Image: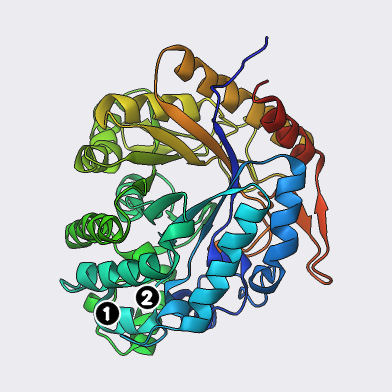
């Protein structure tokens, strides 16, 4: 059945600086990758060398048919030491933005995508009362230098990451999974050894160690939301007409037998608290990959025989429609799908996943919901945090030895959907 999308609908794909640029040596994750013990299976290293190869990547995305490119600016590159801003790095990102415009890609810029400068973590990270002001100062400086070339701004990627980690850790029937790698369980003892080693490496007490991905406390939640709101004000002060929002890792909770009360609580803690907090924003970025099943005693893993992805997620593209509808109902603001995709070696299943997900987007549009774009995660096979380079989300294969890019059939398929503006 044909499904057409509104004129001007944004068709994008996404990356994050640390996952593709390579050699982001000034941020917290780089240090944590190289600790012993560590929960990271391998260091990011050169990643996809996107810092130097962005030109060819942008050309390739445009040639495939996309109209938007979402990427992040690396705070630790821009401000490697507190108060010292690198004009050379800001100029680098300006050239990236110019390349997007030159090739017809609307740039969506994320100001913080999981990684933070090391100096911020040494000062208390995402539980420190001063962090929102420091983040807003960085956002103001970036907007001053780059704001005229940004089409859409995201302050923080997955602002509810800490809440999601806390909720799943508390309710897991099996051992909890590492952030960014839901398919690989780890013991609480292993996690704690890593956290102790990391805190020591940053020169802070274990209780004061709060990098973004490992800050599940209520204090951190307040800090992140305050940082978002102050960043919105800072960006708007620099360019008032720039659309600004935040992205959320919304979850499609399904209650298994006896899990209704737990599912309702998790919906509140992980989804609704954050959706309610951003009701005045220009848009919300919806990000989802699968559903989560919740039983009487906590999270329920996929049943035997159910198709799962390389991340251990259930193959469930219908989660996108469900979370768009929840965001529209609770936040009541425009929606952009800023991440949705699948880690798989079978590219045919990638196409099947995205087609079913897009059918859900089309149903939302048919019902009058204000959905303005779809962004596939990710453009390139890249560094997937603690899982390393094993999961392959990308539309474009990257040879780990030569850095040669090869578009997969799914890249051409989705690019053609973008050209037609419909299925």
Q: Mark 2 = which residue? A: 195
User: Is residue 305 in view from this perspective?
Assistant: no
For the point 49% across and 58% down, the residue is 149
Residue identifier under label 1: 206
Side of 76 relative to 307 (left or right): left
Give x and y (percent) for residue 177: 46, 55
Q: Position of residue 221 (x, y in %)?
A: 22, 56
Q: Which residue in the rendered view is the most extreme toward the top?
A: 1
Describe residue 252's horizontal placement relative to residue 394 as left or right: left
Which SS class for mark 1?
Answer: helix
Residue at image coords 47%, 82%: 87
Q: Which mark is residue 337?
A: none
Q: Nearer the viewer, residue 405 or 57?
A: 57
Kindly indicate whether the residue at mark 2 contacts the one at mark 1 (C-beta within 8 angstroms).
yes
The answer to which of marks 1 and 2 sits earlier in the sequence is 2
Residue at (25, 74) in percent of width and height: 134
Viewer-side residue, 301 vs 399: 399
């Amino acid at each position: 059945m044909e499904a057409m999308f509104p004129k001007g609908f944004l068709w994008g794909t996404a990356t994050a600086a640390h996952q593709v640029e390579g050699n982001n040596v000034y941020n917290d994750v780089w240090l944590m990758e190289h600790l012993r013990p560590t929960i990271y299976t391998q260091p990011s290293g050169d990643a996809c060398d996107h810092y130097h190869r962005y030109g060819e990547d942008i050309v390739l995305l445009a040639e495939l048919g996309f109209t938007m490119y979402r990427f992040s600016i690396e705070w630790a590159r821009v401000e490697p030491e507190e108060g010292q801003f690198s004009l050379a790095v800001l100029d680098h990102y300006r050239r990236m933005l110019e390349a997007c415009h030159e090739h017809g890609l609307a740039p969506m810029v994320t100001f913080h995508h999981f990684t933070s400068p090391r100096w911020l973590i040494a000062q208390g990270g995402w539980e420190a009362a001063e962090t929102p002001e420091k983040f807003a100062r960085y956002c103001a400086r970036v907007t001053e230098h780059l704001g005229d070339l940004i089409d859409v701004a995201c302050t923080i990627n997955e602002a509810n990451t800490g809440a999601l980690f806390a909720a799943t850790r508390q309710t897991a029937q099996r051992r909890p999974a590492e952030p960014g790698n839901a398919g690989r369980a780890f013991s609480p003892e292993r996690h704690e050894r890593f956290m102790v080693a990391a805190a020591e490496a940053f020169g802070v007490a274990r209780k004061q160690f709060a990098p973004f991905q490992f800050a599940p406390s209520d204090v951190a939640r307040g800090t992140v939301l305050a940082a978002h709101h102050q960043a919105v004000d800072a960006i708007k002060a620099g360019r008032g007409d720039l659309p600004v929002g935040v992205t959320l890792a919304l979850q499609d909770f399904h209650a298994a037998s006896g899990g209704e009360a737990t599912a309702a609580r998790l919906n509140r803690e992980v989804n609704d608290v954050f959706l309610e907090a951003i009701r005045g924003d220009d848009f919300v970025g919806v990000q989802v990959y699968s559903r989560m099943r919740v039983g009487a005693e906590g999270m329920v893993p996929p049943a035997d025989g159910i198709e799962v992805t390389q991340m251990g997620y259930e193959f469930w593209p219908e989660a996108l429609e469900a979370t768009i509808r929840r965001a529209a109902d609770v936040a009541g603001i425009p929606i952009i799908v800023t991440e949705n995709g699948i880690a798989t070696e079978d590219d045919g299943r990638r196409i099947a996943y995205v087609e079913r997900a897009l059918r859900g987007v089309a149903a939302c549009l048919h019902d009058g919901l204000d959905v303005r774009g779809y962004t596939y995660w990710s453009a390139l096979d890249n560094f997937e945090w603690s899982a390393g380079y094993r999961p392959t989300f990308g539309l474009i294969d990257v040879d780990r030895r030569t850095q040669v890019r090869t578009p997969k059939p799914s890249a051409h398929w989705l690019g053609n959907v973008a050209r037609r503006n419909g299925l």
